[in-house]
Amino acid sequence: MNIAVNARLLLKNKLEGIGWFSYETLKRITREHPEHKFYFIFDRPHSPEFVFSDNVIPIVVGPQTRHPILWYLWFEFVIPRVLKKINADIFISTDGFISLKAKIPQVSVIHDINFVHNPEQLPYFVRKYYNYFFPKYAKKASSIGTVSEYSKKDICETFNVNPDLITVCYNGSNSVYSPLDEVNKKEVKATYTQDKDYFIFVGAFTPRKNIPGLLKSFEIFKSSGDFSQKLVIVGSELHTTVEIKNTLEEMVYKNDVIFTGRLNLESLHKYLGSALALVYIPFFEGFGIPLVEAMHCEIPIISGDRTSLPEVVGEAALICSPEDHKKVAFFMTEIVNKPELRESLILKARVQREMFSWDKSAQRLWNCIEKVI
């Protein structure tokens, strides 16, 4: 069978949530199914590391999809021509975009539909595109994957999709994430945080990640006692960050906040594994991969209570409203002062993390594909 794959988010050194899902699941699926040919369709020159096996045939066709107009041209004109040329039997798209003009069965992975609930958080043309086309994509797709029961229910109710068409394919954690010993932790803190313990956040700078709320919570925490801990924020700008800058300028303890920018996998493992705890309190999340990565690094978690987050963390986190800054600050204090609490959360995380692995994700995505085959 000729299986065409949208590979446009397989970008060297730029993998984030959807990119990691694509990388980890497609790597396993292609290697486990040598009986099929997989045509990976890229919109720009690709890295050889994404040609996972001998049955992967890379195709590069422009234009590069950097704008909603180019998305439309690529998926509605370029992709149908490529599918016809390679005689594709099925088209797989792990970023939710499919082609409304393609005549073959298509499998779409829609990770979340935050753009429906919070359109103001996206640039004008992006939100217009998403809210016009994604309801059509959901109707057109022969089978749909998503990353949580929350997202499945949200997609079904919002787009009036039959639940039987949707398969939950939870995210996993890269195998690099594991506990660090005390020697490595001390080395990281000596290098980056002046030997101080620190809380950490990992994610792109978008309004839904609630970084201003995290900064306000950290300010309350620091103001509540003689605490030396710092806050490390890992990620890069994606959309508007004016509120982050304004909040930071108003902080008394802004010098205790460290922005690292985007980190490679090895560096991120060191930063995350050496942290006192992950503080992850977004307003909206389809899954939240850093939560599972923290579980594997065996650091405690302070989590928000919105959307999919309680489903992912179970009992392995301290959970509260992302808008309750005093509560978040209180939980930070509890993490600092109660080593037995930290240990309890880590023990619970060892159980909770067994729900999530990329092997399971790949198998569930293949099940999603098999519905069509």
Image (spheres, grey):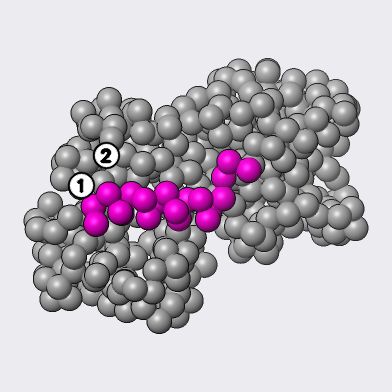
Which residue is found at the position 57% from the left and 45% from the top?
A: 356
Whole-percent x and y of residue 301? 69, 34
Mark 1, residues whose alpha carbon is within 10 Å: few (<14), some, or many (≥20)? many
Residue 195's place in the image compared with 343, above or below, is below
Quadrant assignment for the C terminus: bottom left
Q: Which residues are magenta?
A: 354-373
Callout 1–callout 2 Cβ contact below 8 Å: yes
* 103 or 235, nearer to the observer: 103
Label 2 secondary element:
helix
Q: Locate the N terminus and report the quarter of the image it occupies.
A: bottom left
Q: Upstream in the sequence, badge 1 or badge 2?
A: 1
Q: Quadrant of residue 92?
A: bottom left
Q: Quadrant of residue 134?
A: top left
Q: Which residue is mark 2?
A: 165
Residue highlighted by disc 1 = 141
Residue at 64 percent of width and 59 percent of height: 175
Crowdedness near tag 2: few (<14), some (14–19) or many (≥20) residues, C-alpha within 10 Å = some
Distance, label 1 to label 2, CA atoms, is 9 Å
Q: In this view of the protein, can residue 305 be seen by the observer?
A: yes
Q: Considering the numbered disc 1 on the image, is that residue within a helix, a strand or a loop?
A: loop
Q: On the rendered structure, is 60 left or right of 72? A: right
Q: Residue at x 50, y 47 (%)?
A: 171
**Depth check: 36 or 301 in front?**
36
Q: Closest to the observer: 190 or 160?
A: 160
Where residue 40 sits: x, y (%)?
32, 71
The answer to whether 92 appears left or right of 261 in the picture is left
Q: Looking at the image, is 366 positioned above or below residue 285?
A: below
From the top left corner, tell me how far across and down residue 282 is, in percent: 52, 32
Q: Position of residue 338 (x, y in %)?
A: 87, 26
